[in-house]
Amino acid sequence: MAIREILTYPDRVLRQHARPAVDPASDEVRQLVQDLADTMYDAPGVGLAAPQIGVLLRVAVTDTRWREEDESPDLKVWINPEISRREGEAVFEEGCLSVPGIYEEIKRAASITASWYDMEGNRHTADFEGFSAVALQHEFDHLDGRLFIDLLPPIRRQLLKKRLRKQKKQQMQST
Ligand code: NI
């Protein structure tokens, strides 16, 4: 069990492009997935991407079920994911462990087709809709250095970024 520190805005690591995991079945990836899962459940959150704990590999985990009542954990692992189809529009309120305290309605594709590798090195392709589709787009964006606040209208985005920088400064002064 290893709970890692979650990097927060405006940490520059969050803005980097992550590189593909060369061997999805490696011990390095297995350990990373374990750390991501431990850190996500501890936070708690419904998704976490490797750059958020400072690892620039294209790996993310999600569990969009476990916070609902009577649902047991259902961890999903996404290695080197790609989105090959985006259709429609859906608006969900999103938050992010790397942008604490901010929840905003974000417009994304309502339906996607994604491909990814599992930890045995097998490639999968499937369609996703609704909250799952949105959660995956959010997590995969992290692998390209994108945050959900980047998708806000410019004026709203500027306002939030100013507020977040101020928050961070105050935090750093008080610790
Ligand atoms: Ni996030």
Image (spheres, grey):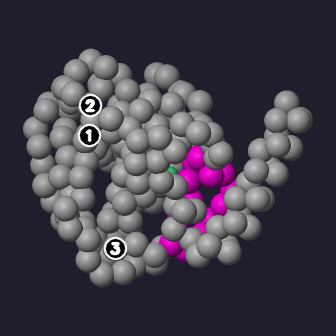
Tell me the CA gap for discs 2 and 1.
Answer: 7 Å
Which of the two discs, 3 and 2, labels the residue nearer the N terminus?
2
Mark 3 secondary-structure assignment: loop
Determine which residue is flagged by label 2: 21
Residue 28: percent from the left, percent from the top?
Answer: 31, 20
Which of the two discs, 3 and 1, labels the residue nearer the N terminus?
1
Kindly identify the amino acid type of the residue bearing the numbered disc 1: Ile
Mark 2 secondary-structure assignment: loop
Tell me the residue at 62%/73% (across/down). 154
Q: Give the residues drawn in magenta, as a range.
A: 93-106
Tell me the CA gap for discs 3 and 2.
Answer: 26 Å
Kindly identify the amino acid type of the residue bearing the numbered disc 2: Ala
Determine which residue is flagged by label 1: 79
Residue 119: percent from the left, percent from the top?
Answer: 20, 32
Q: Residues within 10 Å of mark 2 (few under 14, many from 20)?
A: some
Q: Are marks 3 and 1 in contact (CB under 8 Å)?
A: no
- Does residue 108 sit above or below 88 in this rendering? above
